[in-house]
Image (tube, rainbow, N blue to C red):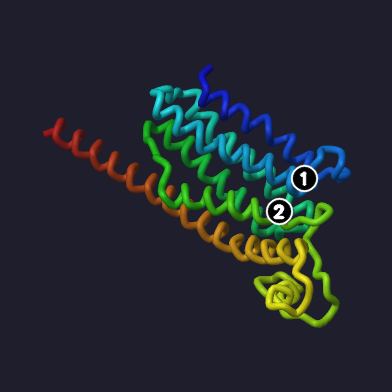
Amino acid sequence: MNLPNLLTLLRIFIVPLLVVVLLTRFAEDYFGLPQHIAGLTLFLIAAITDALDGWIARRRGQVSAFGTLLDPIADKLLISSAFISLVENRLVPAWAVVIIIGREFAVTGLRSVAAAEGLIIPASKAGKFKMFSQVVTISLLIFSSVNGGPPTATLAYPVLQFWTVPEMATAIAHLRGAGDYTLRDFQMMMYGLGRSLLWLVVISSCWSMYGYFKSFYLSARARSAANAAVIASSSS
């Protein structure tokens, strides 16, 4: 047990606490923080441990089989629990989360099959970008939540649809001086940005999954060709 593995375990232990904070209504004076700030703080702490554990392990030469196995599990637990909590709070559509979590199961299963065959599928740049976009999107959506749900406008007049987020024009009008600009308006804009980035998360998840399956196919094909060459040379 070393520091990188302890950070990975800390990320796993934060997951149930994060779910409780995101899904339980409590008064601001209970923790001393508004619910959305408390949830965002916990999530960012967990996300930081994800960046630190790998960096420390490589820097100290403490890369272990235990950490290699546990780190992606901790990542998937964190992201899946956060997205499912956001679905419960009506901040993201369920269909998008089904695609994102389904991709995680598919890639995990593929890597298990590849490991059983002696093939190693390294993390791709698309996969790392996917993880970064997920962290940014979840952070924006948690911050924008109001009383455990999506934010609402502070002015009552007809507005336009913007990235599937109603009342976005209200917040923009406030920013342009049509009214007093408040924290709720800022949360509305962050919510609109988070919902638009959700499309990027879905697309990057599908694209990185395609890259992993393509890498597995090419590796398996190369190995099959090498085995066939060895058999042909030995028979001749």
| 229 in relation to 154, above or below | above
Q: Report the front residue among 170 and 158.
A: 170
Counting from the top left corner in percent of width and height, residue 25 is at 86, 45
Counting from the top left corner in percent of width and height, residue 67 is at 50, 26
Number of the label disc, if any, that sits on residue 143: 2
Q: Earlier in the sequence, mark 1 or mark 2?
A: 1
Q: Residue at x 46, y 52 (%)?
A: 208
The amino acid type of the residue labelled 2 equals Phe
Query: Which type of secondary structure does the marked residue at label 2 adopt?
Result: helix
Query: Which type of secondary structure does the marked residue at label 1 adopt?
Result: helix
| 150 in relation to 101, above or below | below
> Can residue 161 be seen from the camera position used here?
no
**Position of residue 193 in the picture relative to residue 125 (left or right):** right
**Position of residue 3 in the picture relative to residue 195 (left or right):** left
Q: Residues within 10 Å of mark 2 (few under 14, many from 20)?
A: many
> Can residue 175 be seen from the camera position used here?
yes
The amino acid type of the residue labelled 1 equals Leu
Query: Viewer-nearest of labels 1 and 2?
Result: 2
Q: Quadrant of residue 90?
A: bottom right
Q: Report the front residue among 220 and 4.
A: 4
Q: Residues within 10 Å of mark 1 (few under 14, many from 20)?
A: many
Q: Quadrant of residue 197?
A: bottom right
Counting from the top left corner in percent of width and height, residue 20 is at 79, 39
Give the quarter of the figure containing the C terminus. Answer: top left
Rounded to the nearest angstrom, the CA distance separating label 1 from label 2 is: 11 Å
| 201 in relation to 33, above or below | below
Number of the label disc, if any, that sits on residue 22: 1
Q: Residue at x 55, y 61 (%)?
A: 200
